[in-house]
Image: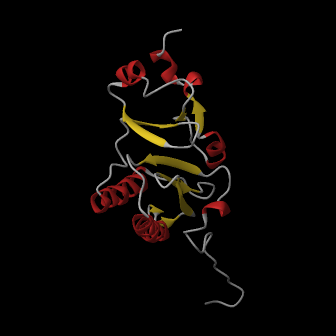
Amino acid sequence: MQKGFFFEPLFQTMYLPFEQLPENSRVWVYQSERKLTEKEIELVRKRLERFCEGWNTHGNGMPTSFDILNEQILVLAVDESGLGASGCSIDSSVKALRELESLLGVNLTDQGKISVRNSEGDLKVFPALGLRSKVQTGELNQEQEVINPMIRIKADLQNLWQPVRNSWLNKYFPN
């Protein structure tokens, strides 16, 4: 190395604890149809930490992290302030999640489901098809909360849940 020349990568560690990522980090929210066991959560943590360490866009590492909410919701996050996530890097994250699906026997990547939380904090996951019948049977009501599909950045996670009555699901209820 030449004297006076100093090279330091922009980001040294690609995986960071979730709370250390900036609020404008891009996030993706994935829902399991059931709660994960403690053993499964530990497996998810190990696998996703290893994935985040190597997650890159066109060979360049990105500061990344994940969080597990309610033992059932996975949030992947990437700080795009240096480099944006490319289509290939997003595909690699989906591949990692599909591997977890296979190991755990759960569905994370199917976007055709709705997570609903009641006042006690209990989660139910419904297929998006057939929501009208869930309203008619009372399984889905306006007092519950649903995951906000508009979540795009880490700061939005403070509004992850929105009342069903204020969501797109309100169209299924008689006014």
**Residue 158: percent from left, percent from top:** 66, 44
| Colour approach in the figure | secondary structure
User: How many numbered discs?
Assistant: 0
- The foreground one among 60 and 29 is 29
Q: Quadrant of residue 104?
A: bottom left
Vertical placement of residue 148 versus 173, above or below: below
Vertical placement of residue 174 versus 13, above or below: above
Q: Quadrant of residue 100?
A: bottom left
Vertical placement of residue 124 versus 27, above or below: above
**Is residue 101 rendered to the left or right of residue 16?**
left
Picture quarter with the C terminus: top right
Residue at position x 59%, y 41% in the image: 160
> Residue at the right extreme?
4
Residue 1 in view, yes or no: yes
Picture quarter with the N terminus: bottom right
**Residue 166: percent from left, percent from top:** 59, 23
Residue at position x 44%, y 61% in the image: 58
- The foreground one among 109 and 138 is 138
Vertical placement of residue 112 versus 67, above or below: above
Residue 59 in view, yes or no: no
**Residue 40: percent from left, percent from top:** 39, 65
